Image (cartoon, coloured by chain):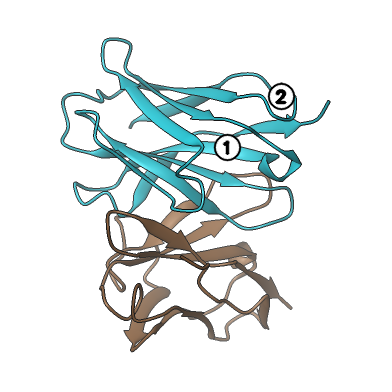
Amino acid sequence: QSALTQPASVSGSPGQSITISCTGTSSDVGSYNFVSWYQQHPGKAPKLMIYEGSKRPSGVSNRFSGSKSGNTASLTISGLQAEDEADYYCCSYAGSSTLVFGGGTKVTVL
Amino acid sequence: QVQLQESGPGLVKPSETLSLTCTVSRGSISSSSYYWGWIRQPPGKGLEWIGTIYYSGSTYYNPSLKSRVTISVDTSKNQFSLKLNSVTAADTAVYYCASPFDTSGYYYEYWGQGTLVTVSS
């Protein structure tokens, strides 16, 4: 069970859209539609932003959207805002009731 | 909303056992058919899933930690616990307990504030 692969950093200007990729394998992302995304600000606990690949929990801005194609899941943040600057982690079900996280992506708002 | 609080020693010696407890408030571990989880984050690094426990006691662990991890639940105290034995410096991390978002056990909605455990002699 290896960590999912995410870019170390992604940046964008306010108002722009950015996309974070999360690449797994046919044993995790590719086989299940149970991908989630978490946002983590420095010194804080993670916050669930997307579940089941593309669903948003109540209270999460619709500027956040998720998708999946093959072994790669993606998180898109549209209308980038200063408060979106944080670390983002993907997470996938990996079979046998186990989960695997990605290495994390630091989003910088220029 | 559910609140979680991790507790336990902040310093553990190499080769010893790390023990943490997560106390759940404003919610009941036993009244929900949910999975409760432990996740850790080494300083400056990413999240790592440690394992999960069903309220009835069934457990599931990260294969890379399975030989050293035990997660248990005490429904009478509304707590669940983590034990990690034979620790090394690589186990130094902030340890989080988390409550499930739904009955699947695949997502975590509420998290504790996290507790830093340092492995050092």
- Residue at the far right: name it: B121
Q: Position of residue A10 (x, y in %)?
A: 65, 80
Q: Amino acid at mark 1?
A: Tyr
Could you tell me which secondary element the residue under label 1 belongs to? strand
Q: Position of residue B102 (x, y in %)?
A: 22, 48
Q: In the shown orientation, is residue A17 left or right of residue A31?
A: right
Is residue A92 placed above or below A70 in the rendered structure?
above
Residue tagged by mark 2?
Answer: B12
Residue tagged by mark 1?
Answer: B95
Please give the name of the residue rendered at 25% of the width and 73% of the height, measured from the top-left corner.
A33
In which chain is the residue bearing label 2? B
Please identify the quadrant where the C terminus of chain A is shown.
bottom right
Please give the name of the residue rendered at 75% of the width and 24% of the height, measured from the top-left corner.
B13
Q: Amino acid at mark 2?
A: Val
Is residue A6 placed above or below A39 in the rendered structure?
below
| Disc nearest the viewer among 1 and 2 | 2
Residue A51 sits in quarter: bottom left
- Residue at the far top: name it: B76
Q: CA distance from mark 1 to mark 2?
A: 13 Å
Chain painted in cyan in the figure: B
Residue A86 sits in quarter: bottom right
Q: Residues within 10 Å of mark 1 (few under 14, many from 20)?
A: many
Q: Position of residue A57 (x, y in %)?
A: 30, 57
- Tally of numbered discs: 2
Chain painted in brown in the figure: A
